[in-house]
Amino acid sequence: MALRSNTKKARENIRNYVLYHAADYLEENYNIRADILERDLYRLINRIFESEMLDHNSMWKKGRGSRFEFFRDWAAGLAMGGLFCYYYNRSAVNDLGEILEESDAEKARFTESDAEEMLTRLIYRDMMKEAFT
């Protein structure tokens, strides 16, 4: 049986997924040590998102669009190296299925587009929770 997305195990799987796919990029491009990366993963990602997408975006400054909409657009632009590659060259259905420990039948309930949206929302949710606590 698949995990619910808000369980402790699912959230742990999401964090491990993000860490796995973002670590090399953060270490190489921002010279961040592994111990800092492990501790401040989502805060770092949020800081990069804000600097790359929000700081100079006139639509954001005018209050046009939600923070998540801007995050999704940023993610779809292949931000953070391989973290969001499920938009282009990995299967979001398979990535989400692994995180939620779904069977093939359970994975089949998602289209690629639905899985991209869900996976981006899960990453965003956990980033916002950690970055602002």
Image (cartoon, rainbow, N blue to C red):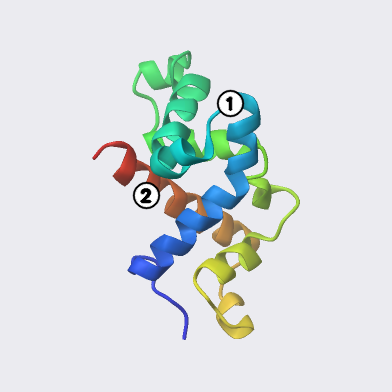
Q: Which mark is residue 31?
A: 1
Q: Position of residue 3 (x, y in %)?
A: 43, 76
Residue 59 in the image: above or below residue 104: above
The residue depicted at 52 percent of the width and 76 percent of the height is: 101
Residue 42 horizontal side relative to residue 117, left or right: left
Q: Label 1 sits on what residue type?
A: Asn
Q: How many marks?
A: 2
Q: Rate crowding at label 1 as few (under 14), some (14 to 19) or many (20 or more) other CA atoms within 10 Å.
A: few
Whether residues under marks 2 and 1 lie with C-beta atoms below 8 angstroms apart, the answer is: no
Q: Label 2 sits on what residue type?
A: Arg
Residue 53 in the image: above or below residue 105: above
Mark 2–mark 1 distance (CA, rounded to whole Å): 26 Å
Q: Which mark is residue 125?
A: 2
The residue depicted at 58 percent of the width and 26 percent of the height is: 31
Is residue 79 visible in the rendered image? The answer is no
Residue 114 horizontal side relative to residue 7, left or right: right
Q: Position of residue 45 (x, y in %)?
A: 47, 35
Residue 133 horizontal side relative to residue 124, left or right: left
In this view of the protein, which residue sits in the foreground, 50 or 35? 35
Residue 89 in the image: above or below residue 98: above
Task: Give residue 83's quadrant in the image.
Answer: top right
Sequence-earlier tag: 2 or 1? 1
